[in-house]
Amino acid sequence: MNGDNSFVVVANRLPVDLQTTPEGTRTWQPSPGGLVAALSPVLEQHQGCWVGWPGISDEAPEPFRTDDGVLLHPVRLTAADFESFYEGFSNATLWPLYHDLIVPPAYQRQWWSAYRDVNLRFATEVATVAAEGATVWVQDYQLQLLPGILRQLRPDLRIGFFLHIPFPGADLFRQLPWREEIIRGLLGADLIGFHLESGAVNFLELARQTEGLEVTGTPTVRSVNAQVHTHDGRSVGVGAFPISIDPVSLGTSAPGGVDKLRSRLGEPTTVILGVDRLDYTKGILQRLLAFEELLESAALDPAEVVLLQVATPSRERIEQYRQARSQVEEAVGRINGRFGRMGQPVVHYLHQSLPKDQLRTYYEAADVMLVTPFKDGMNLVAKEYVACHEDGSGALVLSEFAGAAVELEQANLCNPFDIESIKRAIATAVHGLANSPETMSERMLMMHHQVSTHDVNLWADSFLESLAETQS
Ligand code: G6P
């Protein structure tokens, strides 16, 4: 039986996680990550239905509507699904493979089988809730088989797919023992979107190589000019749709909040900020090492500068995430031991997720923002920081390997694999603010203009309009 939702988004996670407080009460908390931050305002605007996992094993509460009018439809994952589908295939196989092998991906047949099962379960749920002829927008690497399964279950639907992480080069992707199945799964969609043209180019090459399919056109940004022609006579659009932020939902800084924060940090001349999920792709350790060497060489003065690093807990049971955390925490302890003073650490480290309003105060207070991932699909933290500096203050140190570097070219770009390059970018930003504030301000204002004219609505509207134009 078909449901009555004409616009359905399906993502591994719902925008809220069901959590148990230490007192044993159940609460819904915002889910981590950029996907949820970007999609929530879009769903509110379309009053759509969101199908996803409630963030806890073995539970699926009844569907309910949020205060913002979004219908949430929870999908149950068992503890075994959590291990094999989520921690295993999604985050220990696909995640490292798609992030250019920063750690080696593990290939396990049993994880693949769980990935197929869970994709089938999500597809079955979507097939139940979607109205006749509805638009279904499938999100991210956890659900790449879903478009293909859903097309078989419900050929009447218009199906879009968007990948929120990088799509690797063909030579890397071809390692995957189930490469044909993934490509075929994605090709069940009418439109496949990537952040960057390079991701779209990689996908087209693979469609040609692994499936022997005809490809026409070249990928363009926010429109569809490239197509894959499938064996069953369909044409699948492929394009680049760089995701962005909703400046309105960035929270509000409490009056006097910035001054209070700076005073709690010991009134430093320069506040440097990092905000990341604690993930090995984010380059947090290398950033700390760069900071440490700058203190060591006296290029930065520990009496004048502090680094505030927020690291949101993420995928904590996976070995490489544990390792990344212990390396980061060891470095924080060492740097404070070497350069801090009684009651005045030089690195302030928070391993927790913060409410939006507090984060906004941090962004506003930060003179220099460090976003130095080894590889990142887009990185919305960089755009959030820029959006909070409409007065032209501040400086952004940004990795060349973050998708955001394509749009934010006035940032202080660095190569996160090269500690000297990170050091140079930090020092240039700090000294630039002191010695050439006008140039720095011009650069920040140009980036601010880019982010405010290319927000999340442009991303969603351009994708959904392109999807509506595809031939079914
Ligand atoms: C990235 C992914 C999202 C994911 C988020 C948080 O942004 O693209 O799909 O939801 O990280 O990760 P988690 O594993 O906690 O869902």
Image (spheres, rainbow, N blue to C red):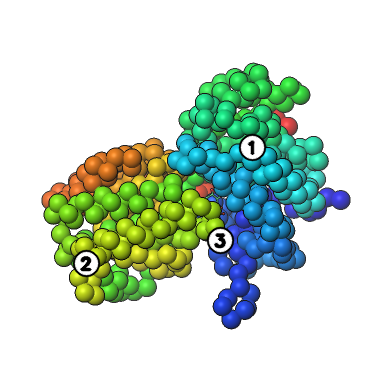
How far apart are labels 3 and 2 at the CA level? 34 Å
* Label 2 Cα neighbours within 10 Å, binned few <14 / some 14-19 / many ≥20: some
Query: Is disc 3 placed on a helix, strand or loop?
Result: loop
Q: Is mark 1 within 8 Å of ligand 1?
A: no
Mark 1–mark 3 CB contact (< 8 Å) = no
x and y, in percent, of residue 329 in the image: 37, 61
Query: Is disc 2 placed on a helix, strand or loop?
Result: loop
On the image, which quarter does residue 119 sit in?
A: top right
What is the three-letter code of the residue carrying label 1? Leu
The quadrant of the image that shows the C terminus is top right
Q: On the image, numbered disc 2 is attached to which residue?
A: 340
> What residue do we see at 61% from left, 20% from top?
208
Q: Earlier in the sequence, mark 2 or mark 1?
A: 2
Q: Is mark 3 within 8 Å of ligand 1?
A: yes
User: Does 176 sit above or below residue 273?
Assistant: above
**Residue sticking out furthest to the bottom:** 23
User: Viewer-proximal residue, 111 or 76?
Assistant: 111
Residue 375 in view here: yes
What is the three-letter code of the residue carrying label 3? Ser
What is the three-letter code of the residue carrying label 2? Gly
**Residue sticking out furthest to the right:** 1
Residue 467 numbered tag: 1
* Label 1 Cα neighbours within 10 Å, binned few <14 / some 14-19 / many ≥20: many
On the image, which quarter does residue 259 sit in?
A: bottom left
> What residue do we see at 63% from left, 23% from top?
210
> What residue do we see at 56% from left, 78% from top?
22
Residue 31 numbered tag: 3
Residue 399 numbered tag: none
Q: Earlier in the sequence, mark 3 or mark 2?
A: 3
> What residue do we see at 25% from left, 53% from top?
291
User: Viewer-proximal residue, 8 or 91?
Assistant: 91
x and y, in percent, of residue 297 in the image: 14, 51
